[in-house]
Amino acid sequence: MFRSDLVATLGYDDGAQGGRPPFDPVLMFKILVIQSADNLSDERTEFLINDRLSFMRFLNLGLSDRVPDARKIWLFREKLTRAGVIHALFDRFDAALRASGYIAMS
């Protein structure tokens, strides 16, 4: 539901120039959802993703998968903020929750 907008906004390419591939944009957006729901700092978010199986399950990560560090989380949020789409993405997320019968309290 969010992938096409995230990829278009972030300008991810096909990786032809080399370098480490970026984290999946949907994974990163889900991390922002966890942060927002639990009011977590970037550092605390990184720690809890590594610590809690429930967070890993929500993010579809295995025990041996790479976890974005606090700097990657900050950079991702900054890119969305600078592009001016972060509020619209969270509004769409809240609307999807409401359509499913859930009410987000924050």
Image (cartoon, rainbow, N blue to C red):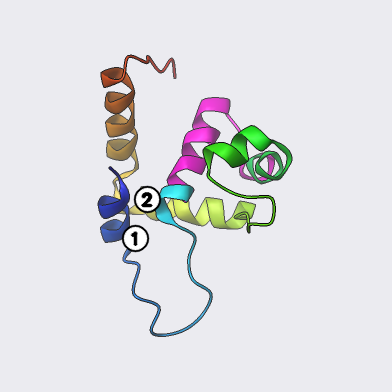
The numbered disc on residue 10 is: 1
Residue 17, how many percent across, how many down?
Answer: 41, 85
| Residue at figure coordinates x 63%, y 55% from the top left | 69
Residue kind at label 2, given as amino acid type: Leu
Q: Would you place residue 33 above or below residue 18 in this image?
A: above
- Determine the secondary structure under disc 2: helix
Residue kind at label 1, given as amino acid type: Leu
Count all numbered tags in the image, as a single digit. Answer: 2
Mark 1 surroundings within 10 Å by alpha-carbon count, few (fewer than 14), some (14 through 19), many (20 or more): few
| Residue at figure coordinates x 53%, y 45% from the top left | 60
**How far apart are labels 2 and 1 at the CA level?**
7 Å
| Residue at figure coordinates x 61%, y 44% from the top left | 42
The numbered disc on residue 59 is: none
Image quadrant in which the N terminus is located: top left
Q: Which residue is mark 2?
A: 80
Q: Is residue 78 magenta?
A: no
Image quadrant in which the C terminus is located: top left
Residue 96 quadrant: top left
Q: Would you place residue 56 above or below residue 20 in this image?
A: above
Residues rendered magenta in the picture:
28-44
Residue 52, how many percent across, how many down?
Answer: 69, 36
Q: Are marks 2 and 1 in contact (CB under 8 Å)?
A: yes
Q: Main secondary structure of the magenta part?
A: helix
Viewer-nearest of discs 2 and 1:
1
